[in-house]
Amino acid sequence: MSSLPSVSVSEIAAAVRARDVTAVEVVTAALARIAAVEPELCAFREVWGEAAVRRAREVDVRVAAGERLPLAGVPLAVKGRYGERTADAVRLIAAGCVPVGATSVPAPGTPWQTWGLGAGGRTVNPWRADRVPGGSSAGAGAAVAAGLVPLATGADGAGSIRIPAAWCGVFGLKSTNGRLPHPDRTGLSAVGAVARRAVDLGAYWRCVTEEGDQEGECVRRPLTALWSDSLGFARADPGPALVAHGAALRLDGAGVVRLLPPDDALVRLDDPGPAWLALRAPGGGTGEGGARGADTGGDTAAAYRLRAANDRRLAELFSRADLLLTPTTPNPPHGHEGPGDRYSTALTWAFNLSGHPAASIPAGFGPDGCPVGLQAVARHGEEQVLLRVMAEAEEQAGLASC
């Protein structure tokens, strides 16, 4: 696959602002990478070549006029056909990003959401074409991992950012539910992004929230963390679990976190699946990243009781630890025929139900040669903590995009 130089979006923007390179040149290079790789990868539903160059030219005019755009000329992929309309994409474009296309998402009416359908066919995992990239932000993860763009927006309703980030070997951030506008009527989905560099997610967050770096939220070093490969209910395959645990140990060894002794009583949630399904689709439904679940009968009262019980347990957990670390998924990427009876969301959708911010950090490769992700979960509103952990994981523990 074609590769994007390991340069941050801030460095790209600085070069455009300094007029060392034009936004048109940066975007034209991204479009050339897409043209070379897209027939095999199928990460895009639409590529907006002419419109992207026109917008890049507008960025160059704004730069020449003295406007300081924090993300001037950065090629951006947006999730789905209407991705430009999301609150975070609007703010990124205002900051100088140039949307180059709409990434693939699963076709409607499918019982599992860990795949994508691009304009040329099914989206493939950049590491193994016979495996899916994860989803539903499938094209976002694949496009970033293949080096087509440095940054892509996504939305995460059950793991839709974290799963493709994990399976494609890049960084992914799901924000606190409700922190930024999202049209999901259930409140289970939250916006976020996928990036090759951890610092790029920091730049994303500063632009969409207008927050500066808040050192005060990360005063305690190292941050205390609890590890769990099951959350008390899930069954993780040994391969991904061992790789993710190894990454957690590397964070501990590098002084990024301090792993606390295992405490099964603290990390023991009820399986959120039935509650998620009832709230998402009363009367039964399908989960992102898995096979069709059992009919919940639309029992929303039971769903709220389960959510409240898990919320109490998570509040207790975060009273003792700053972070919860898990494998991002309990299983490796599956084939294009589907996941069978496995829920790839088993370790992610608990935090869509609870609303906590969560991230996926590249952890390494599993026995099948596919990337594995380490999930980090923080207290509500503590995205800055996750951003700092991701940056230090990349810089100090060597947990970089694959």
Image (cartoon, helix red, strand yellow):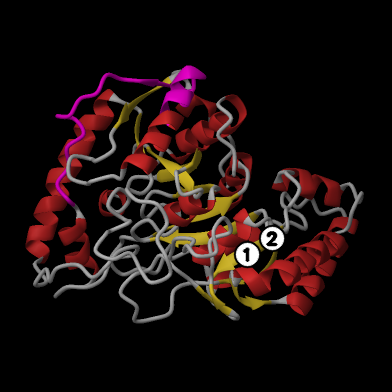
Residue named by callout 2: 148
Front-lying residue, 344 or 89: 344
Looking at the rendered structure, the number of numbered marks drawn on it comes to: 2
Residue drawn 42% across and 56% down?
333
Residue drawn 26% across and 71% down?
286
The quadrant of the picture occupied by the N terminus is bottom right
Dot 1: few (<14), some (14–19), or many (≥20) neighbours within 10 Å? many
Q: Earlier in the sequence, mark 2 or mark 1?
A: 1
Q: Secondary structure at mark 1?
A: strand
Front-lying residue, 381 or 8: 8
**Residue 387 drawn at (x, y percent):** 52, 37
Front-lying residue, 351 or 125: 125
**Residue 220 drawn at (x, y percent):** 44, 18
Is 44 left, or right, of 106 in this rendering?
A: right
Amino acid type assigned to the residue bearing label 2 in the image = Leu
Is 197 left, or right, of 290 in this rendering?
A: right
Residue named by callout 1: 77
Secondary structure, magenta segment, majority class: loop
Q: Is residue 38 above or below residue 1?
A: below
Amino acid type assigned to the residue bearing label 1 in the image = Ala
Residue drawn 32% across and 48% down?
330
Bounds of the magenta segment: 248-271
Q: Is residue 88 visible?
A: no
Badges 2 and 1: C-beta atoms under 8 Å apart? yes
**Residue 28 drawn at (x, y percent):** 82, 66
Q: Is residue 163 visible?
A: yes
Is 277 left, or right, of 101 in this rendering?
A: left
Front-lying residue, 291 or 86: 291
Is 361 left, or right, of 352 in this rendering?
A: right
Where is residue 213, by image quadrant? top right
Q: Secondary structure at mark 2?
A: loop
Q: Single out the residue that lies furthest toward the front.
A: 367
